[in-house]
Image (spheres, rainbow, N blue to C red):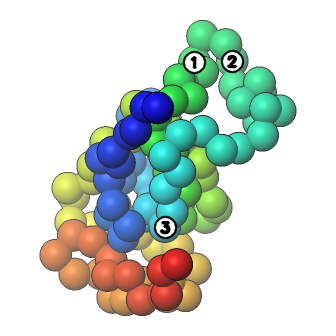
């Protein structure tokens, strides 16, 4: 059995390596847990390996807010010190401090 350790944590601000968006981690899957249809929609030459952590992000780009599902290999930590402006952040996290958001919801 292979185990993987998540590089990023809940409340951490990250950005995508290739696409112009950033977000806050609100959940982590130890390995790919989305649908095969979703995976197949990614161009074959860009598909990430499934046996790595995948992150659920409250994401933003220059024009919208959304939820993103991104492999660890496609993320980097965002050390800009800038908060993320996603409308759902207050439902899950406290105020932005020291470069991240403190968790404000009950974990199972």
Q: Residue 59, position in %: x, y? A: 53, 59
Residue sitting at 27 percent across and 53 percent down? Answer: 78
Label 2 residue SS = loop
Position of residue 53 relative to residue 90, above or below, is above
- Can you identify the residue that label 3 sits on? 26
Labels 2 and 1 touching (C-beta < 8 A): yes
**The one of 21 and 6 positioned closer to us in this rendering:** 6
Labels 3 and 1 touching (C-beta < 8 A): no
Position of residue 48 relative to residue 86, above or below, is above
Residue sitting at 49 percent across and 46 percent down? Answer: 30
Label 3 residue SS = strand
- Can you identify the residue that label 2 sits on? 43
**The one of 7 and 65 positioned closer to us in this rendering:** 7
Residue sitting at 79 percent across and 32 percent down? Answer: 36
The residues tagged by marks 3 and 1 sit, at their Cα atoms, a distance apart of: 24 Å
Callout 3 crowding tier (Cα within 10 Å): few <14, some 14–19, many ≥20 = many
**The one of 31 and 81 positioned closer to us in this rendering:** 31
Q: Residue 38, position in %: x, y? A: 77, 36
Residue sitting at 60 percent across and 39 percent down? Answer: 32
Label 1 residue SS = helix
- Can you identify the residue that label 1 sits on? 46
Q: Number of marks in the image?
A: 3
The residues tagged by marks 3 and 2 sit, at their Cα atoms, a distance apart of: 26 Å
Quarter where residue 46 is shown: top right
Q: Nearer the viewer, mark 3 or mark 1?
A: 3
Q: Earlier in the sequence, mark 3 or mark 2?
A: 3
């Amino acid at each position: 059995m292979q185990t993987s350790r998540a590089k990023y944590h809940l409340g951490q601000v990250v950005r995508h390596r290739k696409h112009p968006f950033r977000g806050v981690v609100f959940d982590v899957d130890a390995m790919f847990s989305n649908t095969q249809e979703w995976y197949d929609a990614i161009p074959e030459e860009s598909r990430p390996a499934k046996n790595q952590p995948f992150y659920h992000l409250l994401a933003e780009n220059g024009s919208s807010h959304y939820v993103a599902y991104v492999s660890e290999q496609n993320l980097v930590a965002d050390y800009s010190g800038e908060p993320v402006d996603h409308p759902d952040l207050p439902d899950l996290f406290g105020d932005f401090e020291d470069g991240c958001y403190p968790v404000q919801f009950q974990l199972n």
